[in-house]
Amino acid sequence: MTRALPMIEGGHVDVVCFEALSELTLAILQKDRLSNPDRGYTFDINIIARQILPKAFERKIPLITNGGGLNPLGAAAAVAQTASKLGLRGLRIAAVTGDDILEQLADLQRGGASFAHLETGEALPPTADLPIVTASVYLGAAPIVEALKAGADIIIAGRVADPCLYLAPLVAHYGWSWDDWDRLAAGIVAGHLLECTGQVVGGNSLALIDRVNPRDLPHLGYPIASVDPDGSFAIYGTPGLPSYVCAETVKEQLLYEVHDPAHYLTPDVSADFTTLRLDDDRGGCVRVSGVTGRPRPEQLKVNLGLLEGYMRELIFTIGWPEAWRKVEQLKTMIDETWHGLPIRRVEYRYLGINSLYGELAPLPDDPYEVIVRVVFTADDQDTLKTAVRRIMANGLSGPAGMSVSGTTVGAEPRAILGLWPALIDRSCVQPQVTVQEVE
């Protein structure tokens, strides 16, 4: 978060966006909200309010984030409290809501919404029969544009689609129409390149693995896009901070989370990456032009989060000789120890051997050591805790030389959130913008 300060203090930007959400994040936020109804937003909101907002407000640089998560109004109230303590009088805080439709699901089903699974086509069973804990619609840029036009200094949203955060200030500034598909698509590409921060400036790069100084990685600045009225733009790093922006890093980020480069679907436009052109000046700046777009989808995506039980893991170390024979003994011991427990699933992976590539990775004949990761699930937490106690009661009765990671033994069960992706008619979703001013 604080890496945004150099671009703000240096006067290098007009707007700063913080993309903060994933489906895993929403699951964590729901857990927080269940224990405290005032929570449900990302902790980053507090950092932004204390350390970044004062500098941005002083320079009249709006901040935009979807870190409001499941509780944008609560996040806005927390920011207002902090801003008041810091004396930021006149600060305008906007909260964007309407993406969370959890409480409306039953009514929507009765109204004819099927929420058919995007991959299987299966209709969603009655919500009363399912442990649904989140229901978040991917909103577009329009409510953020509205908030910017209302003079908001910080905009806190829930589940706005990642690149739409960055599209909004471009629409607000240039007045692009909502059917100017090529310009909207260009703004989406700019947002897509900016949303993962360090990745486009040299982090997480396989292409530059021999060029990036690893000592620079903790200090990479955030990327900046300078966008022209026609939608073409230049992308570069924060001046004064390490940056490795080049055609290779831009291409790596372009491909991130993209299933069909010709149809990158967002709530505002379908962007075509195949028509764009990259011009690398080899001086740390890449120009992007030629992006084209098609009309936005008729429906919006909604992700439902279903509580599917709980999981635990234990990590065992098995040493040479006869390591694989000992591994088989370990599996049999676990199976017998857990006999009668309602364990739903047990999965074994060997860290450093096949944990990433599964069956594609050949197993060595007689390794010096094998690190066995055992993941097991159940419908309730107590079953998992009992399973761990039973294993530990075996003590030195296990395979020769076996050891277990104490950190995994003492861990708590984690909730398993299954995703149910579906579509919803736009008419069923009503985003709202609430603006308050700090006195």
Image: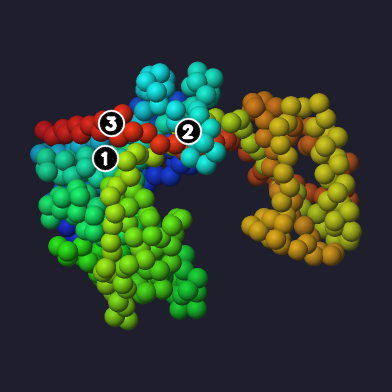
Quadrant position of the C terminus in the picture: top left
Badge number at residue 116 = 2
Residue name at image x 44 percent, y 28 percent: 114
Distance from label 3 to label 1 (Cα)? 23 Å
Left or right for 233, reference 130: left
Q: Give whichever of discs 2 and 1 has the lower sequence position.
A: 2
Q: Secondary structure at mark 3?
A: helix
Q: Residues within 10 Å of mark 2 (few under 14, many from 20)?
A: some
Furthest residue toward bottom: 282
Front residue of 91 and 147: 147
Residue 311, position as x, y percentages in the image: 64, 36
- Measure how far apart labels 2 and 3 are at the Cα level: 17 Å
Name the N-terminal-most of marks 3 and 1.
1
Residue 407 shown left or right of residue 67 in the figure: right
The answer to which of marks 2 and 3 sits earlier in the sequence is 2
Q: Which residue is mark 1?
A: 156
The residue sitting at 36% across, 50% down in the picture is 265
User: Looking at the image, which residue is at 26% across and 69% down?
Assistant: 289
Q: Please state which of the two labelled residues, at mark 3 or mark 1, is closer to the viewer.
A: 3
From the viewer's perspective, is residue 360 above or below residue 148? below
- Percent position (x, y) of residue 20? 37, 47
Under mark 3, the amino acid is Ser
- Image position, residue 420 (x, y; %): 50, 35
Q: Secondary structure at mark 1?
A: strand
Q: Is residue 323 visible?
A: yes
Q: Which residue is mark 3?
A: 427
Badge 2 marks a residue whose secondary structure is: loop
